[in-house]
């Protein structure tokens, strides 16, 4: 009773004056014919939302139910499709302590509106982290975003509008396709070779099609796991410099180098200021915090921050402050050291398992880090659905290759991820993959 | 030393094998001419970011340094310009307990990627809250966003592209202008009268200019503080129904009714499903959490969620889970009850102070809640800057009226806010305003 009274008062539907009884304030009611309209069957809607939607809005919806992931039939499914840091390895207690510390030390500021470019200590922390990877940026050359996806959204808002062209690797990150279609951008698909984007094809595209932007993932490319070498990075940069075309370098797993030679990001060589480097915590730890960033020339950062401010005022200050604390306290490095060991063992188990179990005719990449490998399946893309269904029936979930191309490719592929599966399950997954593909092989 | 070693290992620049010494892995270096390029003076940039920017990107930057807020010269400034809930009243301890509880109970999920439409318990909580305000929506008719600004950004992405027209009140929220310009939308400014948007003017605009959307703030309108009546809301809805034009209802301070009759939102009467209702916690409590929402027909929510997913994958799950907990535990209602008393007293102090101190010729609105009042200053818009400078010299910071119009208005205005100033400071602020405007009056 007291609680109900309190709620009415809090809502402003009850008034009380000193020394008088409380009175319920007059509250206007909607017309009688309209009350309860929601209780019975609803009338026909007045608007056709499909027809109302902008072309970009329509494209976003059409991207949604993409069947990139083949569902398994068995209850005991080994999920080799997830591309996210294993939540079981996340240092929850450490983050809780960081949140507590932030609220105690700077609770007011951390819960108030922040700067559109990000929480200043986090910008400092990220700049320092970038310098470790050879990228010499100051804090005001870093813009904090809500994950890498929003960073890419801002970059596109700045640089590419409807009808403009953007060069992308084929295959590439499926949600990059969705984002580019939302922006009504035309995709120029540049084939990926074993050593990275086909630079002759890129050179031709730069010459003839004048893209507004070249989007590339030099490390542990999604979906293939390919890491490009120093010479490839230098030539890619030189090509874009010559054509004065900005590069969007997606360093989403920069921190996930756990074997093989480490190569510095393209951005580390960007003397001319043409690279927008996108980083993120999400593929390393705590994706739910939504912390990503762009490192770019000041002139670009100022403009990106203006777009950020117009589109969402500012980011989540509490999450940004907690992430800054998590890095400043050294927990981030300790966490990385721990998970590098885990993922290295998982990747080794996967590579061993594939070599032992898969039939001849199936090939795969050998990543230097990250989570994903790319299987070239026996057969053409027309066989892909059938092959993935067969894999699913054996109890393994993979990401079908088709979802990573805009245009239909020639061959059948699947992306495997070691992110959320332990070594024993990886070995068992390889046995199942072997059974599924050997049977497919026999039938073909 | 151990720490430095650990960091190198974690970064992947150091390898160790069981039973062997650790070795530093080969790390490729950028070409010698490029190393240290950032240390000396930088070479001329290769790109002209102004020329590269899309028209929307250019518009966003041009909006940034708007001089809406007149800076005071004195050190003892009374800030009547801030439109944000008073951080001094925010229940930090309660939120900290909510965060802790969320991390303990559902830490894994709250730190992982969430649903693009929002944390399911928060969607339920918001739907329940909407029903309290007469809006009958289910959880799947609610999309959680990063504040009201991002909600509006999504709505525009769905409904209005370059060259499309959107009807807005004049004056209106300045950052709505910035957002609409980012979308390259043409603004149809509909004059605001004492009782709300001029509906005859709106009817003419709907007939002749076919806007894609009508944007309105029926409660405690920003900047004027005007709340529209039931009849006005019904006619506005009927007009848009007749023209099949969606309404974007900005209920940013729905929870801030603290005196006067409470009128239900337009959305509460929306039988035909043409209203996208935008709500937010940011103007009530914890803006740094960035929690807003859209309540709309399912057909619209599905499309908005698709755009959300393409543009940022999903929102901040931790903040959403904490907000849900804060509401479910009853702390939100208790907080509202407490701050309603505070803001009511502040608004009363402001209205009393203005009546006692301002010279004849200055008029102002009498809000039914919220934070803002709108001063009609003596003189024309050409005098506004001079008047605001005079106010600033007396030690009061106000928001100049010009920033709330797209086209230059006739009269001079200023927005006052009671949000972050206590009663004593409000009374002193009114005295200073009185001095500034009486002197101005005498000079005119």
Image (tube, coloured by chain):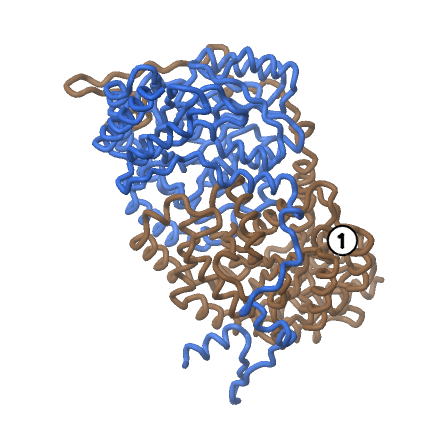
Chain colours: A brown, B blue
Q: Secondary structure at mark 1?
A: helix
In the image, A336: left or right of B288?
Answer: right
Where residue A365 sits: x, y (%)? 71, 69
Q: Quadrant of the N terminus of chain A?
A: top left
Q: Eyeballing the image, is B240 above or below B143?
A: above
A117 or A60, which is in the foreground?
A117
B378 or B148, which is in the foreground?
B378
Name of the residue lying farthest toward the bottom: B20
Where residue A119 sits: x, y (%)? 43, 53
Please report the residue visible at 65 percent of the width from the left and 39 percent of the height from the top: B55
Please report the residue visible at 26 percent of the width from the left and 18 percent of the height from the top: B355
B283 or A286, which is in the foreground?
B283
Residue named by callout 1: A385
Name of the residue lying farthest toward the right: A444
In the image, A113: left or right of A222?
Answer: left
Count all numbered tags in the image, as a single digit: 1
Please report the residue visible at 32 percent of the width from the left and 57 percent of the height from the top: A101
A162 or A9, which is in the foreground?
A162
Q: Is residue B274 visible?
A: no
Q: Chain of mark 1?
A: A
Where residue B101 sits: x, y (%)? 35, 50
Q: Eyeballing the image, is B49 above or below A85?
A: above
Q: Eyeballing the image, is A191 above or below B192?
A: below
Where residue A175 sits: x, y (%)? 65, 50
Q: State the image quarter where residue A192 is shown.
A: bottom right
Q: Is residue B346 visible?
A: yes
In the image, A76: left or right of B130?
Answer: right
Please report the residue visible at 56 percent of the width from the left and 13 percent of the height from the top: B201
Mark 1 surroundings within 10 Å by alpha-carbon count, few (fewer than 14), some (14 through 19), many (20 or more): some
Q: Quadrant of the C terminus of chain A?
A: bottom right
């Amino acid at each position: 009773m007291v609680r109900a009274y309190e709620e009415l008062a809090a809502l402003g539907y009850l008034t009380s004056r000193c020394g008088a009884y409380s009175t319920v304030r007059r509250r206007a009611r909607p017309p009688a014919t309209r009350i309860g309209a929601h209780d019975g069957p609803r009338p026909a809607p007045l608007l056709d939302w499909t027809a109302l939607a902008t072309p970009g809005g329509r494209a976003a919806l059409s991207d949604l139910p993409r069947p990139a992931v083949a569902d398994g039939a068995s209850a005991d499914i080994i999920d080799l499709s997830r591309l996210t840091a294993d939540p079981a390895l996340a240092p929850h207690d450490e983050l809780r302590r960081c949140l507590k510390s932030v609220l105690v030390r700077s609770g007011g500021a951390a819960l108030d509106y922040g700067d559109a470019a990000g929480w200043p200590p986090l910008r400092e922390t990220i700049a320092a982290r970038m310098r470790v990877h050879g990228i010499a940026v100051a804090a005001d050359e870093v813009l904090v975003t809500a994950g890498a996806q929003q960073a890419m959204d801002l970059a596109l808002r700045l640089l590419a509008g409807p009808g403009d062209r953007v060069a992308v690797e084929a295959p590439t990150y499926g949600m990059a396709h969705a984002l580019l279609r939302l922006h009504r951008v035309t995709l120029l698909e540049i084939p990926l070779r074993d050593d990275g984007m086909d630079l002759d094809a890129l050179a031709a595209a730069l010459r003839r099609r004048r893209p507004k932007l070249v989007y590339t993932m030099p490390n542990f490319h999604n979906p293939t796991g390919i890491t490009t070498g120093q010479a490839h990075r230098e030539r890619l940069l030189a090509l874009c410099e010559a054509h004065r075309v900005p590069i969007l370098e997606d360093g989403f797993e920069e921190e996930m180098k756990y074997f093989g030679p480490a190569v510095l990001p393209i951005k580390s060589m960007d003397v001319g200021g043409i690279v927008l480097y996108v980083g993120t915590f999400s593929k390393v730890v705590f994706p739910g915090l939504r912390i990503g960033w762009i490192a770019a020339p000041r002139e670009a950062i100022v403009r990106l921050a203006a777009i950020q401010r117009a589109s969402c005022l500012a980011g989540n200050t509490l999450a940004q402050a907690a992430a800054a604390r998590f890095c400043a306290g050294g927990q981030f490095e300790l966490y990385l050291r721990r998970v590098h060991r885990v993922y290295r063992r998982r990747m080794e188990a996967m590579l061993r398992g594939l070599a032992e179990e898969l039939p001849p005719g199936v090939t795969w990449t050998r990543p230097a880090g990250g989570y994903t490998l790319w299987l070239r399946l026996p057969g053409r893309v027309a066989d892909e659905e059938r092959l993935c269904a067969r894999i699913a029936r054996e109890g393994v979930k993979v990401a079908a290759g088709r979802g990573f191309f805009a245009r239909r490719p020639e061959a059948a592929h699947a992306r495997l991820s070691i992110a959320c599966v332990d070594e024993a399950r990886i070995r068992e997954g390889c046995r199942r993959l072997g059974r599924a593909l050997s049977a497919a092989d026999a039938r073909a």
